[in-house]
Amino acid sequence: MSVQKYILTSDKFKGEVLFEFTDLILSKYETSGAELTEEQMIYTAKHIPRELAEAIAWFARSESAKFTEIKQEITFDMFWIRYDDKVNSSKKKTEIKWNKMRISERIKAFEYIPAYFRSIPYGTRKKYAETYLNAELWNN
């Protein structure tokens, strides 16, 4: 069984819509991470293609939508290990913040860690993990 996940973002709404395809067929459609109007929700529910290839083609025709595959799900444990500040940072507080973040933000935060570490001036301590997430440095 093959599972592929995609995120839909657009300048027409805030947040993201999660799509999951199992064996190339839509198996999950989650809008809880997006601020959609009732009209947008109804339109999407009625018209979204049920097969992955059709969905990719459908969103490719849109000028405002971005349909991005999640190649690897980034877990909190992966973030915690990569950030590596177990002595000073609160794992509990950091995980609470992590769980409130959208998937796309988690990916950006995780991927930005090496660049952030390189940008820290010599002799300066890195931010606590929770502070790193709150500061959203990857968006600067």
Image (tube, grey):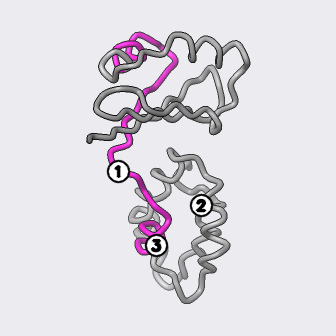
- Disc on res. 72: 1
Q: Amino acid at mark 3?
A: Tyr
- Select label 1 or label 3 by which is in front: 1
Decide which of 84, 26 is in the foreground and name it. 26
Decide which of 46, 17 is in the foreground and name it. 46
Decide which of 127, 56 is in the foreground and name it. 56
The tag earlier along the polypeptide, 1 or 3, is: 1
Q: CA distance from mark 1 to mark 3?
A: 18 Å
- Disc on res. 32: none
In the image, farthest residue toward the bottom:
87
When the figure is inspected, residue 54 is found, relative to residue 88, above or below; the finding is above
Label 1: how many residues lie within 10 Å, few (<14), some (14-19) or many (20+)? Answer: few
Seen at 54% across and 81% down, the residue is 124
Which residue carries the number 2 mark? 98
Q: Amino acid at mark 2?
A: Trp
Q: Secondary structure at mark 1?
A: loop
As drawn, is 121 to the left or to the right of 136? Answer: left
Q: Amino acid at mark 1?
A: Gln
